[in-house]
Image (tube, rainbow, N blue to C red):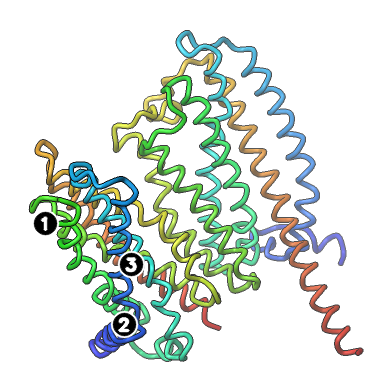
Amino acid sequence: MSENSLAIRKFSDLANPTRFLALADRVLPWFAALTALFFVVGLWLSFTTEGDYQQGETVRIMYVHVPAAWLSMMCYSVMALAALGTLVWRHPLADVSSRAAAPIGACFTFLALVTGSLWGKPMWGAWWVWDARLTSVFVLFLMYLGLMALNRAMDDPARSSRVSAVLVLVGFVNIPIIKFSVEWWNTLHQPASVLRLDGPTIDPEFLRPLVVMAIAFTLLFFTLHIAAMRNEIWRRRVTSLRRLAARSAGREA
Amino acid sequence: MIALFFRDLKLSIRAGGGAMIGVLFFMTVVAVIPFGVGPDLNLLARIGPAILWIGALLASLLGLDRLFQAEREDGSLDLMLMQETPLLVTVFVKCAAHWAATGLPLVIAAPLLGLFMNMDELAIGATMLTLLVGTPAITFIGAVGAAVAVSLPRGGLLVSILVLPLAIPVLIFGVSAVYAAIEDPAPFLPPLMILMAITLFFAVIGPVAAAAALRHASD
């Protein structure tokens, strides 16, 4: 295959896995380097800025907790978009993307839950509260695990893809519930303070490291996601090569 | 469609259908609770509505995996996929029949178990009403899970795992409506209305998603 045919001009060109792999190989080092850079700056900022006058040093948990929680929702949205791509456009990579995103999303959700509970113990006096935001994020975690179980239960990716895409789309109703749970119900968890119509209500001292860490986490997600998609494509190729080998071995014998 | 409704109903009520097993399971779950928390009548009266709701939720999950699996085994699912009436309507009717066979007996059995729980008449009535309104939503959500897992050899447990997180809002609003009815200051109607809204919402979403999943699961 000549170098020219690997050029990507349209989004649909990505449907060819070889083209995607070429792109991933070119892009991944850059993404990884950017992620590392942002993490270094973000961590440096988050450990050098002042602590809160009430919460003291524990406010630094926020720099991990908030980006992880935000990514746990974005990851599901990416999965829902990919599910739409599977069902509507039959894009072959959409299924790979949604399958690769589920474990990453589960990890970020778990991270958000753990850091939240570490932060909740000194601030609220309890590891866990059955509050609307916490409960809905826990439900999101369970849904990630259920989707992973479903993906594993079916061995044929072509058939499991559309079926799990349907389930991903149905589960998407949970995302707006999580986002607005702090506004609809009186929760112990504080309402949104960064993404607001009337500007952030958080002090710039805390906002700067938070934004840098959020960018770092988002870049980390994309790096991991592209790498996981590449692994998934390779895994499928290995499986089909194994099947071919087994078939030809049976024919010779 | 009416014929399909009665066919499904008969199949699940007669021997081997498993509709009565759901009620039996419901009764067993509720009967086990006093052994766990102790026979304190005041405590039982307070947590009774929640126990009835959880028992009904678990019992209606129990039979869900058979919703499409029997049809797939004897091949009538392919006929349903091929017939001229939209698959959506077929799925909806099947859900309705499944609810009439498994959900409705739970609603009818609820007052008896409410007496075991030392609940007063108002609480029993409220629980019955919310179960009547809320259990169809569980069936419709469960239809999606059943359709997704229809081709799996041992999908029963997976259906419960997939469906339970989505059914949590039904449980929350069902139980909060009952407690709103018992405790005076909280208004009863808003949670009941939201419960109805959830049921109607899933009555639309469930059959659409289940039909899509069934189409793709068949090959």
| Element at label 3 | helix
Q: Residue at x 49, y 76 (%)?
A: B150
Q: Position of residue A104 (x, y in %)?
A: 62, 47
Q: Is residue B179 above or below residue B117?
A: above
Q: Earlier in the sequence, mark 3 or mark 1?
A: 3
Residue receiving disc 1: B125
Q: Position of residue B206 (x, y in %)?
A: 36, 67
Residue receiving disc 3: B25
In 3D space, how far apart are the residues under numbered discs 2 and 3 (Cα atoms)?
A: 16 Å
Residue receiving disc 2: B12
Residue B52, located in which quarter of the rendered image? bottom left
Q: Earlier in the sequence, mark 2 or mark 3?
A: 2
Q: Position of residue A6 (x, y in %)?
A: 79, 60
Q: Residue at x 70, y 52 (%)?
A: A228
Q: Nearer the viewer, residue A63 or A34?
A: A63
| CB under 8 Å between discs 1 and 2 | no
Nearest to the eye among marks 3 and 1: give it.
3
Q: Residue at x 30, y 70 (%)?
A: B24
Q: Is residue B158 above or below residue B117?
A: below
Q: Which mark is residue A41?
A: none
For the C terminus of chain B, the image quarter is bottom right
Q: Amino acid under label 3? A: Phe
Q: Earlier in the sequence, mark 1 or mark 2?
A: 2
In 3D space, how far apart are the residues under numbered discs 1 and 2 (Cα atoms)?
A: 27 Å
| CB under 8 Å between discs 3 and 1 | no
